[in-house]
Amino acid sequence: MHHQPVTVWPVIAGITVLIVSLAHLFLRKERRERPWDDFALVSVRDETAQRSFALHGRETLAKGLKECSGPFQVMTGSGPVIVLPNRFADEIKNDPGLEFNKGIKQDFFPDYPGFEAFREGLEPDSVSMEAIHKKLTPSLGLVTDDLVEETTAALHDIYGEDDHWQTISIKNSTLDLVARTSSRVFLGEDLCRDEQWIKIAKGYTINAFTGAFKLRLVPALLRPLWQWFIPELKALRNVVGNARRLIETEVVKQAAVVEEALRAGRKPPKLVNTLRWMYELAGGRRVDYTGAQLAFTIVSNPDKLVPRNAWLTRMLPQVAMGAQSALHAQAIINICERPELLQELREEIISVIGERGWKNASLHRLELMDSYIKEIQRLHPANVVSMNRYANKSVQLSDGSVLPKGSRIQVCADSLNPQMYPDPDRFDAKRYLKMRQEPGEASKWQLAAVHASNMGFGLGRHACPGRFFAVHHIKVSLCHMLLKYDWRLVPGADPAQYDFEESVRRIKPSFQVQYRRRREEINLDMF
Ligand code: HEM
């Protein structure tokens, strides 16, 4: 009788892959999700450490600070994080052993198709990072006219011209405003008004986060194959494809204008947007313009992030649009409760912009506004920890404790320290203005300056490089929003409309405010 040859090799190969994958999964879980030795694991209300931090993050941190004399740890959804009291902020701020990007890279898949934004955005020497440092920050004076024009057009579309009170979600409306006005600076006039682009910027984030989350659940060996079966990653690849079509068309268009001018022996017309800047900086280098633009917008919709991505939800909302729109929204909410301050801010805008126009120096002179926003970052921060780091090697602290290689770190804020801030629980819009009036302190307490006592923009070598633009941007927006509209809370509405996730506080999308068009004292569009 003829026997069918037994095809044992595929079976053996399959079993081997399974065993290796399970071993890998086990080891990975062991390595990344077990608390570190030598650091107290803090929890409150008899909850498990993970639930304690997820549900009562700020309370858990407060307990750790009160009961532990030094660093302690909390358990996040994706493993332990060692929390340092604020006194270590200056000590570790420039430590080369503590990286910003590595933690994100580990949880995302920059080499897989769809994750181009992570590949481009997480390279410290990427052209997009260079564009922020070398072009965007030094050229703020050049982007002001575009920002002013786009703000006027966007406010007209979003809030309109009606002088009767109307009700709107402050979170969604400021997100729409910021998505459009910052896209004007990132991409130029045509794309910032393109609904398809705005939709892409919002869709990319949710698919990237959900897809990465699902992929992380699978053993590493299977991921190269598994990625093709995850619906969100299919959607992600489509979004990138659509973005690529839009952005590359724009790159070709902008490049053609430059080439044509050069061929005709003319100086190319000036265009101020990061796309053009990256093109100029690229030299011979290959640049993924689409990945870079998606990286700029990656957190345009931070509310939709998946809870299990806790480590990332803490880090990424602090980058770009999500943080900018949250600060815009908080500035409006706070002003609703302070009509006298609104009047003072209006007077400052009228006197500074009215007399000097939209110069860079004028925006510097909006010192009350500067102080007001910094006080919001102090007293109503989106997060009470900052300086997310990953230890590339073990790092010894001055108290003798050792941050193990592979651990993730955060530093607690100290913005309620009465030694630093008298009457710390009081919201004082002029607090930083007064501090700047002390001899020698004029620039130390500017909104864009970083200091361990207010880490709204981080601290040290990984402090936010986009902060100078962010400050410029919010000042242009607030000049328009405060002068053109009256604002108030919805009468009788619950003031506590925030969601808390771990140590992060987010404004609920359902948080509504009321506004109506007023006649502005000066025409901001004429300067
Ligand atoms: C109000 C707006 C913004 C706020 C509050 C903010 C806040 C922050 C904070 C706190 C960090 C440090 C995170 C940490 O150390 O854990 C950070 C980093 C960063 N931010 Fe911002 N940011 C804002 C806007 C922007 C903008 C507009 C850009 C880009 C143009 C940007 C690009 C970045 C980048 C690339 C990093 C990482 C820096 C590095 O890897 O060294 N941010 N941001």
Image (tube, rainbow, N blue to C red):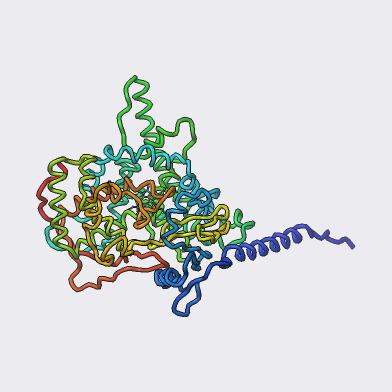
Task: Determine the image quadrant of residue 219.
Answer: bottom right
Who's the residue at 46% across and 47% down the image? 121
Where's residue 54, x and y in %? 45, 70
Q: Relative to 223, is 145 on the left or the right?
A: left
**Rendered-image quadrant of the C terminus:** top left
Residue shown at the point (39%, 64%) measured from the top left: 504
Q: Residue at x 34, y 20 (%)?
A: 264
Q: Quick one: 195 or 137, which is closer to the camera?
A: 137
Q: Is residue 36 left or right of residue 449?
A: right
The count of marks equals 0
Residue beneath the point at 51% across and 71% down:
41
Q: Is residue 156 visible?
A: no
- Res. 493 in view: yes
x and y, in percent, of residue 227 in the image: 56, 56
On the picture, is 72 further left or further right than 200?
Answer: right
Instruction: Name the quadrant of the N terminus.
Output: bottom right
